[in-house]
Image (spheres, rainbow, N blue to C red):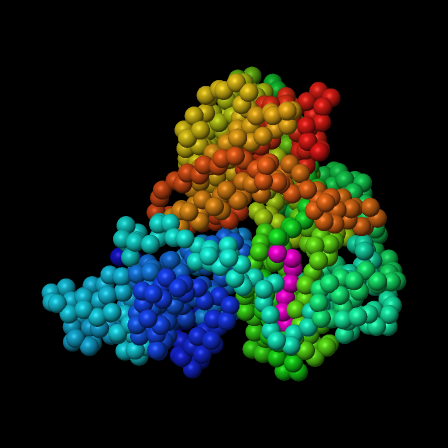
Amino acid sequence: MTKIKTQYNRRSFLKVSAAAGGGMLIGFSWLTGCTSDKKMDKIAVPNEWFDINGYIKIGDTGLVTIYSPNPEIGQNVRTSMPMIVADELDVDWENVVVEQAPLNTGFYQNQFAGGSLSIKLSWNALRMAGATGRRMLLEAAAKEWQLNVSDLSVEKGIIKEKNGERTVSYGEIASKAVGIEIPEEVELKEISDFKLIGTSIKNVDGKKIVTGEPLFGLDFHREGMKLAMIQHPPAFGMKIKDFNEAEIKAMPGIDDAFIIDTTIEEPDWCDEKGFLQLIAIVGDSTWQLMKAKKAIKANWETIRPLESSESHLANLEQALLSGKVGQSRRDGNPEAAFKKAAKVIERTYSSPFMAHNTMEPMNFFANVTDSSAELIGPVQTPEALEKSVSKLLNLDLENVTVNMTRMGGGFGRRLYVHFGVEAAAISKRIGAPVKLIYSREDDMTQGTYRPAYRSTYKAGLDENNNLIAFTVRGAGLPEGPVFPNRFPAGSVDNYAAEQISGETNITTGAWRAPRSHFTAGAEQAFLDEVAELAGKDPIDFRLELFNRAISNPVGDEYEYDAERYAGVLKLVKEKCNWGETKPGVYRGVAAYFCHSSYVAEVVDLVLENGQPKIKNVWCAVDCGIVVNPDGAKHQIEGGVIDGIGHAMYSQLTFDNGVPNQMNFDTYQMIRHSQAPENIEVFFIENEIAPTGLGEPGLPPAVGALANALYQATGKRITEQPFSLNMNVGEKQLLG
């Protein structure tokens, strides 16, 4: 067995007394306890609970509560994280209930949802929590029976003598385990001994989701709370001067209206940088608040240039020519190689700004007093929110509490904490608890968009159709999309990559698989074009490059494992019967590495009445150990649909700083009828610690779709959204 120290970073989350934290943890079951009636029929409600550590409490009847520390945005961590703890604890899953832990940096580390890092960063901590709980319970039983721990075994929460008849349940021994001293190190299970990890467990919130039980921030209610909505300037580059305050206050159901300022000295990356002064309206119902919003007559002043889509395109083109270069890499002499090349191809790809469009509108509850701030709602970065509210209100961190609800989507949008900060500012102003609710238009016009991108790729082939030179320059507003040390770095003798930053007033932020979602589509479409120029099969061409990176890599540094990368391509090639042709079926492939995981995808589409219809998508995934196969499959499926939908349809355009698309009547999201009819997901089995999963399925879907569309239409589509840039002859396929 692997041994692991029970100290994690600089904190020991295991050394927790009931006085220090048990009360808060036990009390935090107002919204997210998931005990089902079925479970309560099998096991009695405990009379007493015993805190084993910050992740586990055990009732005297054997019922076990496991706290899920990270925010839940649909990635299923509220199931998979407790599964890891439960497996090491060796408890019957039928006797487990799951609760959402509040923000507590003394107990937990990396308590956020972003970068597909939840399981990856918490793998050891979760296993250690379960293993330590198991060890403490075994030691308590050994002490009771005057035996050594090695004389005992445990299975599904029942401790047994190896050479005797005595047994004791976790519930029966839990009270005596509380006083056991924490061992300096504990033994983890061998991977081959996992019982829960690697099995499909149903979503612990599934029944509540489908039956509409309260889970989300919008569901939260507290007696006596007020509702609030905000109005920000109509254009990026504008600021509020004043508004018809008295008229708004006099409207039915409106308690107050005022301007709030959410400026934070020394703001962090997660803080709002665009609209810091807002009109806030407080009242009794969202309908009355929306009517009041429509009656606002505000005076705005222009403080920065008002940008339009035409200026954004010019800024990107200028950045590509002479912009500020960030990360870069250079191997060999690409310029000299291009001069010697027998064939050279160059292509530029672009993508507009995009919104996140979480299905649950942005919202947050705040209750601010002179000495404290309580915040409850859907946020991906609760610790960042805690710090920002502390700064804004000049409160000590220990006087700010953040509790997390389930989120109806995040996609990076809820990494940024301004909506929670705004709720806190409004609550402080009115001296009462309040829930702030955004309308869809508020969210879509506020910013924090996915940046606009533009990249130019160039490749050179020798007389034998070998790739001898490859360059990419990518610009973004504001951050460029290029990853210089990713593929094909390491596989080409003469290679150069530059990430270039541009300037914009539009506020931007991380969007599911940041930068990768664009780069994968552009890079993989370009590689298909290079393969065609070389007269080679697209998969075989990629595998040639991976073989070079495996056998004789160029340079000392590149991020990916070429063997694992090639492995997913080989698997998807096998599963989709690559090379098999069917009349009227058009096929595209792509593979990409991001968030430490590898995904290859093949898209099959047909043309129905002149419009593309995706029939099948095959996905091969290497993300290390798969904790919950069903949940993992759903993550990949969702990423595929998300990638296809946004690449095909989505864009935000601007006139004089004003977004043209403000709701779903003008901003097109993928419809059910446009989603793939079938998605098959295959995982490569290995014993590598889990890596990212929530995002890596999205980027290759864009490239595979672009390559399939080329096969169907004979046209290389280099600009997103594809629906506006794709024709067969004179006929517009999509609108």
Q: Residue at x 29, y 57 (%)?
A: 189
Count numbered badges in the picture.
0
Q: Position of residue 267 (x, y in %)?
A: 68, 65
- Magenta highlight range: 360-366
Q: Residue at x 76, y 68 (%)?
A: 280
Q: Position of residue 288 (x, y in %)?
A: 75, 65
Q: Is residue 720 above or below residue 688?
A: above
Q: Is residue 433 above or below residue 482?
A: below
Residue 229 is at least partly visible in this image: yes
| The N terminus, quarter of image | bottom left
Where is residue 65, by image quadrant?
Answer: bottom left
Q: Nearer the viewer, residue 136 or 340?
A: 136
The answer to if 449 sits in the magenta stretch is no
Q: Which residue is farthest top?
A: 463
Q: Position of residue 405 (x, y in %)?
A: 54, 64
The answer to if 364 sits in the magenta stretch is yes
Horizontal placement of 211 versus 321: left or right?
left
| The C terminus, quarter of image | top right
Q: Is residue 206 above or below residue 638?
A: below
Q: Nearer the viewer, residue 553 or 709?
A: 709
Residue 549 is at least partly visible in this image: no
Q: Residue at x 65, y 24 (%)?
A: 610
Q: Position of residue 15 (x, y in %)?
A: 38, 75
Q: Nearer the viewer, residue 16 or 204?
A: 204
